[in-house]
Image (cartoon, rainbow, N blue to C red):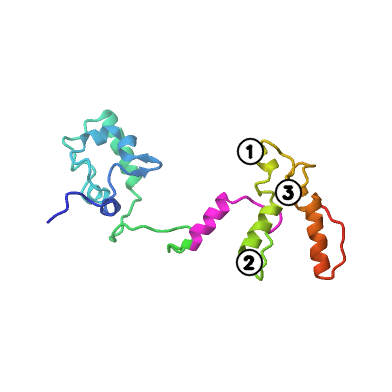
Amino acid sequence: MVAAFRSPWSTIIKEVSSLKDKDSWFGDKQLKVAFPRLFALEECKDISVADKLHLSLSHSFRRPVRGGEETHQLDLLSGALESVTLSNMDDRWIWDLNGDGSFQVKGVRAMLDEAFLPKMDSPTRWIKCIPIKVNVFACKLSLNCLPTRANLLSRNISVTDVSCPLCEYNLEDVSHLFFGCSMAKDIQNLVCRWWNLDVYPYDS
């Protein structure tokens, strides 16, 4: 039993294996756009470029070329195809990002990162001996990307109160929440006492 529909992959493979007059072969234009009078004469609209070059450009026309614009377009097309040499191998996909024609997921990821990730003046500090979530949190902290009330307000998100919920004194931004708030300083004192460290004043 033959399926009543073709899968997307079978359609893609069929298109890859036959380059037609409707593909962009002349600069960034399709041949039917660059040479509309010749395309109107073509009997087989889906003829491949290889079949057109096998005999002559006009062998599949419904009638001979009649001078004027038709002859002009035929001369232009003939001149453009003089240096074209088709290989005998089947059409295939080539991944040209790495320069060796091979597809690698790593190369795609690197390309996307380069195109979309923000560029930083200083490299991201990544410490392997601590949990990943701690690294991620520290990175967001250094980039001021944590959802503090000040950051939410700057992104037009409705916030009823922008003051720090811990001390109810200053604006809740990264600098205050982790360095200026009285609770943050109390936690620092407890940690330093636990590790027998001297307490030094700090700021963001």
Type of amino acid at the residue the image marks with label 3: Val
The kind of secondary structure element at disc 3 is: helix
Could you say whether the residue bearing mark 1 is in a helix, strand or loop? loop
Q: Position of residue 148 (x, y in %)?
A: 68, 45
User: Of label 1 and label 2, which has the lower sequence position?
Assistant: 2
Q: Give residue 143's mark.
A: none
Magenta segment includes 79: no
Give the main secondary structure, helix, strand or loop, of the magenta stretch.
Answer: helix
107 is within the stretch colored magenta:
yes
Decide if residue 90 is on the left or right side of residue 168: left
* Residue 204 appears in the rendering: no
Judging by the rendered image, the residue that carries numbered circle 1 is 155
Which residue does the image show at 71% across and 53% down from the upper left?
142
Q: Which residue is mark 2?
A: 131
Q: CA distance from mark 1 to mark 2?
A: 30 Å
Query: Is residue 71 shown left or right of residue 173?
Result: left
Asked if marks 3 and 2 touch (Cβ < 8 Å), the reply is no
Q: Where the N terminus falls, by quadrant?
A: bottom left
Q: Which residue is mark 3?
A: 174
132 sits left or right of 164 in the view: left
Q: Residue furthest top?
A: 68
Residue 2 in view (yes/no): yes
Which is nearer the eye, 154 or 167?
A: 167
Q: Magenta residues?
A: 106-123
